[in-house]
């Protein structure tokens, strides 16, 4: 097959040729858009799942639908560390500034447009951004507090009020939301809560690892009731088959049933793995239909690629002590490993392993589904560790 026409794009956040298995989540967001058009409130959304299940792809799809319906949207990706925290603040400020410039001409009530512009300009100055000229003099700014939480509430209220009159909404799309610093997360939760109480159409649409709901709940006592949680998991058998077969069919290429079954099985129906195996079979397949032999070759090549890229990138982030902990989890086996069993395997006290466990959770390599248990955030990571040890 012509590799230049390969219809499978493995990569972080790259949209597949055919998006399958996410109809329920897309419909939920379409309902949110419809509610805004009818001046009805909806609930903000959190997309929760392991790495490689397509959260970023889905988040981008939701943003596209919001843009198509003339919402004011801003997308940011959170990251850890001081530089990452500063980057998020600047991205939100710059994103609001750019979006407000696009919307000024669309807003029919000029007083609303002017109030939106003044609030966004003031927020930029408050965060020390101010890289985009909005044509507003400092003397026209509303009062600035220098407090992130209060100033964010002010800019959200002004933008959402203007958009409400247009039967539209403001949405902030946040990828890797679990990496937000505490101050930023608390400010966003407060802004969302305040907007809801004032019936203003502002929505946080976040994507993150399974640890995110717990972090959100700890930021504010009421936060866990605010969001509609969407658990983004592996695809079912039929959506997984379609994710492989439909892109090929668009180029008049077919799969034999056993070839399709093999790739669906070895991928575990995880979207990222499906794209990797699909990309490999496109390279090794010499003719249509793709055979079981083609699928077996593609699976071997795909696993090698995942081992050297996707899995290795996560492994490299761990320290030697953290790798010992990850290895212990793999040796114990099962979906979850109990922390007491890990301590016993490593011949160490559970309390002394607490910092290692906390660091792994903070790095997004594991999470705690319930008290005393841990799981990998990376699908099939246990198999990678075992292959690596062999």
Image (tube, grey):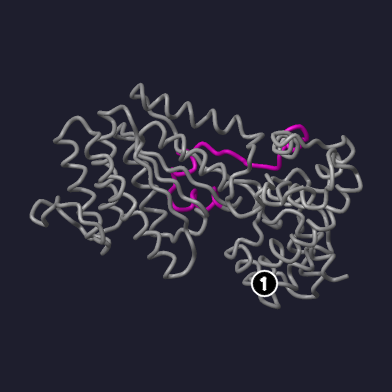
Tell me which corner region of the image, top left, top right, bottom left or bottom right, holds residue 161.
top left
Q: Residue furthest bottom?
A: 320
Question: Callout 1: few (<14), some (14-19), or many (20+) C-alpha neighbours within 10 Å?
Answer: few
Vertical relation: 126 (above or below) 119: below
Relative horizontal placement of residue 126, taking residue 28 as reference (left or right): left
Q: Position of residue 283 (x, y in %)?
A: 78, 52
Residue reaching furthest to the top: 38
Q: Is residue 353 left or right of residue 122?
A: right
Q: Position of residue 233 (x, y in %)?
A: 67, 42
Residue depicted at 14% across the width and 50% down the height: 142
Residue 14 in sight in this render: yes
Q: From the top left corner, tell me how far across and down residue 322 is, in percent.
A: 69, 72
In this rendered view, identify the residue nearer to me: 279 or 170.
279
Task: Reply above or below: 82 against 39.
Answer: below
Q: Residue at x 44, y 29 (%)?
A: 32
Q: Disc 1 marks which residue?
A: 316
Residue 230 vertical position relative to residue 80 in the rendered view, above or below:
above
Q: Measuring 74% from the left and 40% from the top, which residue is drawn there?
A: 244
Residue 40, relative to residue 147: is it above or below?
Answer: above
Quarter of the image for the C terminus: give it. bottom right
Q: Residue at x 81, y 58 (%)?
A: 301
Residue 4 image point, x, y percent: 67, 51
Q: Is residue 30 magenta?
A: no
In the displayed image of the protein, which residue is found farthest to the left?
A: 139
Instruction: Report the front residue among 66 and 371.
Output: 66
Over which residues does the magenta segment extend?
A: 212-241
Left or right: where 326 falls relative to 44: right
Is residue 356 left or right of 173 when viewed as pictured?
right
Q: What element does badge 1 sit on?
A: loop
């Amino acid at each position: 097959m012509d590799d230049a026409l390969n219809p499978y794009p493995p990569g972080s956040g790259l949209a597949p040729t055919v998006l399958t298995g996410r109809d329920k989540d897309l419909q939920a967001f379409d309902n949110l858009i419809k509610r805004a058009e009818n001046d009805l409130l909806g609930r903000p959304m959190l997309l929760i799942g392991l790495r490689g299940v397509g959260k970023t792809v889905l988040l981008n799809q939701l943003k596209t639908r919001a843009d198509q319906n003339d919402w004011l949207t801003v997308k940011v990706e959170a990251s850890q560390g001081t530089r990452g925290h500063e980057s998020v603040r600047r991205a939100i400020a710059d994103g609001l500034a750019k979006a407000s410039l696009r919307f000024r001409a669309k807003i029919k009530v000029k007083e609303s447009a002017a109030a939106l512009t003044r609030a966004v300009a003031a927020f930029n100055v408050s965060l020390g951004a101010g890289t985009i000229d909005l044509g507003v003099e400092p003397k026209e700014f509303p009062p600035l507090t220098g407090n992130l939480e209060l100033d964010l509430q002010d800019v959200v209220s002004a933008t959402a009020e203007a958009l409400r009159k247009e039967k539209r909404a403001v949405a902030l799309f946040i990828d890797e939301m679990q990496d937000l610093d505490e101050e930023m997360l608390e400010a966003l939760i407060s802004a969302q809560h305040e907007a809801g109480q004032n019936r203003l159409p502002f929505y946080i649409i976040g994507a993150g690892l399974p640890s995110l709901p717990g972090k959100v709940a700890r930021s504010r006592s009421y936060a866990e009731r605010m969001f509609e949680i969407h658990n983004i998991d592996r695809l079912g058998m039929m959506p997984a088959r379609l994710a492989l077969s439909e892109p090929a069919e668009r180029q008049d290429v077919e799969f034999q049933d056993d070839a399709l079954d093999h790739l669906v099985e070895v991928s575990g129906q995880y979207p990222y793995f499906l794209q990797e195996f699909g990309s490999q079979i496109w390279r090794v397949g010499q003719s249509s239909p793709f055979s079981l032999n083609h699928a077996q070759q593609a699976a071997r090549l795909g696993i090698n690629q995942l081992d050297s890229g996707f899995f290795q990138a996560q492994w490299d982030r761990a320290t030697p002590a953290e790798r010992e902990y990850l290895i212990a989890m793999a040796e114990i086996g099962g979906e979850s490993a109990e922390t007491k069993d890990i301590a016993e395997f490593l011949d160490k006290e559970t309390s002394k392993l607490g910092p290692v466990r906390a660091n792994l959770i903070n790095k997004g390599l594991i999470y705690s589904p319930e008290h005393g248990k841990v799981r990998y955030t990376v699908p099939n990571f246990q198999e990678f560790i075992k292959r690596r040890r062999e």
